[in-house]
Structures are given as C-alpha cells and as structure tokens.
Amino acid sequence: MTSLAPEEALHKEAILNLYNAFRTALINRDGKIAAPLLSGETLHHFGSLRDIANQNRTAIELGPLERLTVLSMQRRLSAALLVGGTDLEIMAALINESLFGAEIADLDLDSVDIVFPEAYGVLKVGHQILSLRLPFLWEKPVNAVSEAWRIHWLGFLPAIRMALKGALSNSGEDVNTALTRLMDWRDNKAESIKKTKTRSLISGENRHGRDSL
C-alpha cells in the first residue's frame, strides 16, 4: 500500500473532517454552521436563484431542479430574506428549512482523490461504493483569512439534475404536478420534524419537574 505524503494526508484528513461537519450540520438543520462550508460559486449560484424567486416569477424557463429550488424559496423563505439576505444567509435558510443537501444525508465519504486545487470524494452507503463523486475546492472562504477546502456543491448538481429528471419521468405526472407534490411532501416532513422537536423539548421540561402544557 502506497503511503501518503504528509501534506497530502493532511489535506485528505481536512476534507474528511469538512464533510463530516457539513453532513452533521445538515442533519441538525444548522445552516449557520453548514452554509460557510460551501464554495463561493455554490453560494453565488443559489443567490442568483433567489434573485429569480424575488421577482415572483414562475421560473418556467428553468430546468426542474432549479425550478424546484425557486418555488421552494418563494413558498418557505420570508419576503424580507429574499429581498435583503446575502447569498450566505439564503443558503443558511435553505438548510434550516431542509431544502438543501438531503442527497448526502445518509452517505459516508469513503476516500478522496486530490488534483489540487480540486478534490473529489468517493461516496458510499454502508459498504456499497457509489459512482457519485462530491467535488471540493481549495479556496478562500467567505469571512476567512486563508484558503481552505470547501464543498463545491455546484459541481455536484449535474448528478442531482439527472436523478430528479429520472424520478419525474418515472412518476408518470407532468413536471408541474410532480414538483408541487414533492414540495408538499417536503413541507409535511419539515413540519413533522418541528413537531417532534417541540415534543422533545416539552418532555425534557416535564422531566425537570415543570408544568406540562
């Protein structure tokens, strides 16, 4: 087995730690932590979709994935945020609302190939290696002093677009109907999570001897 050069080993460890921190933040719906771990180009892309959502257009000229994002922004994000939010704040809100990143919530990072200043993570579910590769970029992140690895989700979008296109095709519904149904499902799931967290908080208070509601 070929041993890694010390610097390469440090880079791979940094990418693994980055991915694990990002995935944990996604699962916890913590956009404040997760959003700054994405590449600047990724943040800018979703910021540009916010601009479309802010114009209150139907986004019919967009592909299904971008249309889904714009319609979800219009439905779930506040008007004030759409008007005045930064790209970073928009992404944080998308993550808080479970509108971003679900594709990797159950996936582990198996290994990393580095072609500096880019890197590609091999994803797996359980012990099964997937053909998906998650891109990373070495760049100067938002509000940071020096360069660091960031998740380049923009480079991952083609795989997501292809998967969504296949799912829409197999649904037997027209695109608008299928996207609306998907948004309704995500809304119901998000509301269920909120109720579960509320019940957990109430239970925690009761265990500490506080009055039940």
Image (cartoon, grey):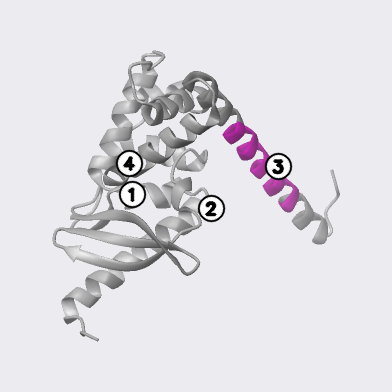
Numbered disc total: 4
> Can residue 167 be seen at all in this image of the molecule?
yes
Residue carrying label 4: 157
Mark before the other along the chain sequence, 4 or 3: 4
Q: Residues within 10 Å of mark 2 (few under 14, many from 20)?
A: some
- Cβ atoms at labels 1 and 2 below 8 Å apart: no
Instruction: Indicate which disc, 1 or 3, sits on the residue closer to the N terminus.
Output: 1
Magenta part of the chain: 185-200
Q: Are marks 4 and 2 in contact (CB under 8 Å)?
A: no
**Of labels 4 and 3, the one closer to you:** 4
The answer for how far apart the CA atoms under marks 2 and 3 are is: 15 Å
Q: Which mark is residue 195?
A: 3
> In the displayed structure, does residue 179 sit left or right of residue 65?
right
Q: Position of residue 34 (x, y in %)?
A: 40, 51
Instruction: Locate residue 112: give its quadrant.
Output: bottom left
Please name the amino acid that badge 3 sits on. Lys
Q: Residue at x 50, y 67 (%)?
A: 126
Q: Is residue 174 above or below residue 204?
A: above
Magenta span: predominant SS is helix
Q: Earlier in the sequence, mark 2 or mark 3?
A: 2
In the image, residue 154 above or below residue 110? above
Kindly indicate whether the residue at mark 3 contacts the one at mark 1 (C-beta within 8 angstroms). no
Task: Give the class, few, some or many, for how many residues have Cα within 10 Å of label 4's Cα (few <14, many ≥20).
Answer: some
Of the two numbered discs 1 and 2 on the same chain, state the one appearing first in sequence.
Answer: 2
User: In the structure shown, which secondary structural element does the residue marked by tag 3 occupy?
Assistant: helix
Q: Earlier in the sequence, mark 4 or mark 1?
A: 1
**Relative to the observer, which residue lies in front, 194 or 201?**
194
Q: Residue at label 1?
A: 36
Give the amino acid at mark 1: Pro
Decide which of 191, 61 is in the foreground and name it.
Answer: 61
Residue 21 in the image: state x and y as whole percent. 41, 61
Residue 28 is labelled as 2
